[in-house]
Amino acid sequence: MRVLPIKGIRIGEGRPKTIVPIMDATTTELLASARHAVDAGANCVEWRADFLVDPHDADALTHTAHALAAALPTTPLIATLRTKGQGGRLEAEAEEYAHLVRALAQQGSADLVDIERGAGDDVVRALVEEVHRHGGHAIVSHHDFEGTPATDRMCRILVEMTALGADLPKIAVMAQHPAEAARLMEATACAAEQLDAPLLTMAMGRAGTITRLTGESFGSALTFCALEAASAPGQVGLAQARAALDALHEALAPEDHTTRGIRP
């Protein structure tokens, strides 16, 4: 898997990196939440820009992005403007959505900018190019809040998003049963075998919680965690997630020669 190095954080290497979303309405509140996330040990901070007082104000978006970037000199910042159709708060037509994401990209403050797959191939390609032109990295995302698509369909979505230029393809689905969570992990492993890129995958809901912790085994390089309020169903608290990720990373470490031949 290709490693994505950002501010000293090597995404795609070692245990999955933790992301804490911040969803405040004002820049002042966001700065306080960002500091809280870093102090708590988050590897990355996701700014949910659709929670801003007026997410339609491009100038306000770029101002806040700059302020957050200045406050996070050693922590990767993800800028996400999530539309209502994809589980967010922004109500905007396709043209306005593209305009606002382009404004975030052109600011160059966010290390990663989220671009929704549903914006359409041409729009996604153009926005990815804009992000790259200003020195950022592009997440291309797909959410399914109704269920878990077929395994081969999920794998294909990840491959398609990478073909559109995603540095980090993201898929989130809703799992009602453990078997659906298992299929998400299978799809992740399928895509990881085909792609030279770190992935971000998860199954939402209680049944999908396990997928947020086992990414190292299947190819998902990051995981979303909650400080207080979760931004998606099934999110694990940051401290609990860090402990579980560290324990799994240790268990997955190369076998020590002194333990060879010892049976469980």
Image (tube, grey):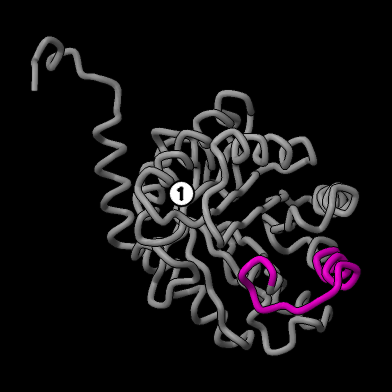
Residue 76 screen position, x and y as percent: 58, 57
Quadrant of residue 240 within the rendered picture: bottom left
Specify whether residue 65 is painted magenta.
Answer: no
- Whether 41 is drawn above or below 122: the answer is below
Q: Which residue is mark 1?
A: 17
Residue 94 in magenta stretch? yes
Helix, strand or loop for disc 1:
strand
Q: Pick the quarter of the image with the C terminus.
A: top left
Point out residue 221 in the picture as x, y percentages from the top left corner.
50, 42
Amino acid type, label 1: Lys
- The residue that appears at 44% across and 54% down in the rendered structure is 175
Q: Quadrant of residue 41?
A: bottom left
Spot occupied by residue 8 in the image (x, y as percentages of width and height): 54, 46
- Name the image quarter holding the N terminus: top right
Q: Is residue 103 above or below residue 163?
A: below
Identify the main secondary structure in magenta: helix
Q: Which residues are magenta?
A: 85-103
As drawn, is 19 to the left or to the right of 121?
Answer: left
Q: Give the residue drawn at x 65%, y 39%.
A: 158
Give 70 or 244, whichever is nearer the viewer: 244
Give the residue displayed 29% in from the left and 30% down from the top. 252
